[in-house]
Amino acid sequence: MNRSALDLWVGIFVTIGVAAILFLSLKVGNLLTVSNDHGYRLEAEFDNIGGLKLRAPVKAAGVVVGRVEGIRLDPKTYEAVVTLKIDRGYAFSKDTIASILTSGLLGEVYIGLDAGGDTRMLADGDTITKTQSAIVLEKLIGQFLFDKAAGGAGAPAASGGAAPAAAAAGGTR
Amino acid sequence: MRASTVETALRRVGSVTINSVERVGFAARFSLAVVVHAPAAVRRLSLTLREIYFSGVLSLVIILVSGLFVGMVLALQGYDVLTRYGANESLGVLVALSLVRELGPVVAGLLFASRAGSAITAEIGLMKTTEQLSAMEMMAVDPLARVVAPRFFGGIVSMPLLAALFSTMGIFGAYVVGVRLIGIDAGSFWGNMQAAVDFRYDIVNGIVKSVVFGVAVSLIAVFEGYHARPTAEGVSTATTRTVVASSLSILALDFVLTVFMFRGLGV
């Protein structure tokens, strides 16, 4: 095999190999749209984070605006402290509510942000004060059964259906 | 009599230990020498190009065809299981993550070991048998720089490219089966895949894995060839040892790397 044919074949090989790496990075890994390094960090404290995991999405109105970057337990208050990394370009007001939600019954757990009306905005390192914890299905069922039993023993009031759902949905702090 | 039996047994244990320590030391010194001579591969670029041609370009057919079929089979089997949980839109995620993280580097590495590694060992072993290596030393040409370094370097360059091509073909095969044949929505196939695959965690780690496998396979291949017994039988034993040793080290290294890369990620 002479040198120019060799060069051609090796050139083709290296080019399609690099093209494959680019394809994996851009099309599969979606490197262009998700910028990892730009953004600011917020903290939020929850009573219970349920099945929240690292790198879970943070969504506002269903749009992904960031990722969960860290989860730790506050040793004094025994609350979970979640660090959120929000993409630069999205600003949220001081009275934003962060809630832990699940997409579908068995879907992924994510953090939903509901923006408020405050004119002051959250900056890097701030803490979201209004949070709503994850709904733990077992507690919900337990409370429902408890209320059902209590309602059945007392007066035949049919109010047992609506009250536990509201009670178990977690108090907005 | 009894004492001499014990003595013979002890002697045997001692000789096995000394031989294996000697072999390990030998392999370590040889690896060091190969790494030291690796820049020679850049200086002799035409030789290195030739080796990239032999280990990379000539492995293209087997890598591309296997990648295509692995991806198509993954799509069929994955669809069968995912559809029981009503999650068949996650097919793209399943295929892309398994290919990019594990199957791409590992299967491409195994194919590379048996297609290119064995050829490198046989070539160097036969050069040794026919005393070409000794002849080079006579002419003051270092065989490590002239023969070993280009093959080692060529393997390291080829392996990540082959693994990336394997994964790409696999994802293409899964697309053909999942979207074109079965009829999953193309938007959710790509969209879920892009949401789940992370550049830093999945793709970079996959490339790191394939580079490590490339170094391991190339090193084992040139070592076995360089230290083959200079007989026809010795070359055949060395070729077999290359395939067995590099396949086992790929699988073991893959486990170790996976433990360090994907531990505590919660996914």
Image (tube, coloured by chain):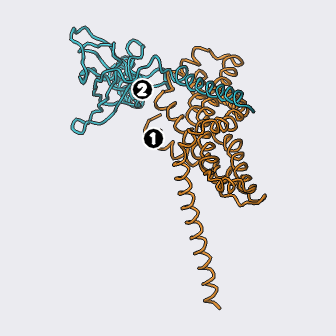
Chain colours: A cyan, B orange
Tell me residue A113's x, y (percent): 34, 16
Direction front: furthest residue: B139
User: Left or right: A59 with respect to A43?
Assistant: right
Amino acid identity at mark 1 = Arg
Query: Is residue A97 positioned above or below B199 on the image?
Result: above
Query: Is residue B226 positioned above or below B260 on the image?
Result: below
Question: Which mark is on residue A56?
Answer: 2
- Residue B16 in view in this figure: yes
Can you tell which quarter of the image residue A44 is in? top left
Residue carrying label 1: B263
- Circles 1 and 2: CB atoms closer than 8 Å: no
Judged from the image, the secondary structure of the residue bearing numbered disc 2 is loop
User: Left or right: B263 with respect to A171?
Assistant: right
Question: Which mark is on residue A39?
Answer: none
CA distance separating discs 1 and 2: 16 Å
Which residue is painted at 38% across and 20% down in the image?
A: A66
Which residue is painted at 49% across and 21% down in the image?
A: B195
Q: Nearer the viewer, residue A127 or B107?
A: B107
Nearest to viewer (mark 1 / mark 2): 1
Query: Is residue B129 positioned above or below A54 on the image?
Result: below
Instruction: State which chain disc 2 sits on.
Output: A
Q: Nearer the viewer, residue A85 or B142?
A: B142
User: Left or right: B68 with respect to A126?
Assistant: right
Amino acid identity at mark 2 = Ala
Judged from the image, the secondary structure of the residue bearing numbered disc 1 is loop
Which residue is painted at 48% across and 44% down in the image?
A: B259
Query: Is residue B121 positioned above or below B200 on the image?
Result: below
Q: Nearer the viewer, residue A155 or B16?
A: B16
